[in-house]
Image (cartoon, rainbow, N blue to C red):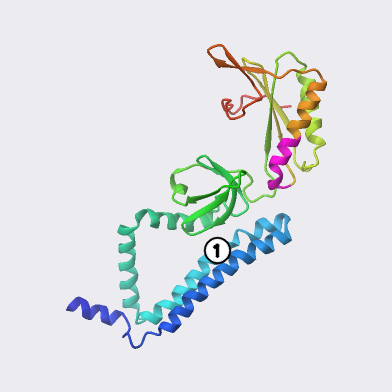
Amino acid sequence: MNDYSSLTKVLRDINQINFVRIFIIIIGAWVVMRMVERAVPWLAERLGGRFRLYILPSIPVMRLLIINVALILLVPTIIEPTLQNLAAIFAALAIALGFAVKDFGSSLVAGIVAIYERPYRPGDWVKIDRAYGEVKTVGLRAMRLVTPDDDTVTIPHLKFWDTNIYNANDGRRDLMCVTDFYLHPHHDGALVRRKLRDVALTSPYLNHERPIVVVLKEEVWGTHYKVRAYPIDCREQFQFISDIAVRGKAALLEMGVELGWRPLGAGAMVPAGDSKESLPRPERGAYSDL
């Protein structure tokens, strides 16, 4: 009986609660959030360039602001707005949520932290675990990215606590692209490096304000070259890599340079340029720079 009387002191009498107001606040907040999620990307696409990367990160901040405003309007409608009542209600909610949805709560906290620390934001190209793509939305619980194969991946912010997050552009318009070439060891290395640099320099996707670097490493099966350069826009990275790969291969064949072959094991051989994923990742510092 004491518990019931305490609860009735906290909550308003049912006759005093304006349910129409509650309904309008909830629907209004939902409509405003949907309008923001549609209007901001639409505006960002039309402004383009660096303005796109400045505007898109505002979506989660605006969503959080809308939710907070809705809660501020809802609480006095249901609860007698005294300091003691508000403290009791929020303490009870915090304990209940902590036990019932620990992982969900951890994702929410990580989402709030991510909004301010910004390890990723809409428009960034990130890699988390095995997923790589462009961040489209950053919600309170999870973020969504779209891979180059047009797959949508939803990743909870809980990964923020214990997973390395690789951000390729970190809010910038461009990012570094790496194009690999695997060649037979018998060739003029200096000439090949100059030729590959010229190929990158003449690409229509190249950002001429950023450097071009050609590095190499001698392997047991041949020579591994990497062309490191920046496209004008992040979304052109795959066209940029393909352009350098196609024209670079043609230029090398004109020079008479042969592709390298990498031992696969048990006497089998595979063209070194056939599968980028099958090759071991190079160690940092193992390449020589110009």
Residue farthest top in this picture: 267
Tell how many labels: 1
Magenta-drawn stretch, dominant element (helix, strand or loop): helix
Judged from the image, the secondary structure of the residue bearing numbered disc 1 is helix
Amino acid identity at mark 1: Val
Visible residue check, residue 229:
no
The picture places residue 138, in percent across and down from the top left corner, at 54, 56
Q: Is residue 165 left or right of residue 275?
A: left
**Residue 71 vertical placement versus 132 (above, below):** below
- Residue drawn 66% across the image and 55% down it: 53
Q: Which of 247 and 290 is in front in this view?
A: 247
Q: Which of 86 and 226 is in front in this view?
A: 226
Residue farthest left in this picture: 1
- Residue drawn 45% across the image and 83% down it: 21
Q: Is residue 91 left or right of residue 280?
A: left
The verdict on residue 89 being magenta is no
* Quarter where residue 10 is shown: bottom left
In this picture, which residue range is highlighted in magenta? Answer: 233-243
The picture places residue 55, in percent across and down from the top left corner, at 65, 61
Tell me the crowding category of disc 1: few under 14, some 14 to 19, or many 20 or more residues within 10 angstroms, Cα based.
some
The picture places residue 104, in percent across and down from the top left corner, at 39, 56
Residue farthest bottom in this picture: 15
**Residue 106 vertical placement versus 79 (above, below):** above
The verdict on residue 235 being magenta is yes
Give the position of the C terminus as an image quadrant.
top right
Give the position of the N terminus as an image quadrant.
bottom left
- Residue drawn 35% across the image and 88% down it: 16
Which residue is tagged 1? 61
Visible residue check, residue 189:
yes
* Quarter where residue 148 is shown: top right
**Residue 78 vertical placement versus 143 (above, below):** below
- Residue drawn 59% across the image and 45% down it: 147
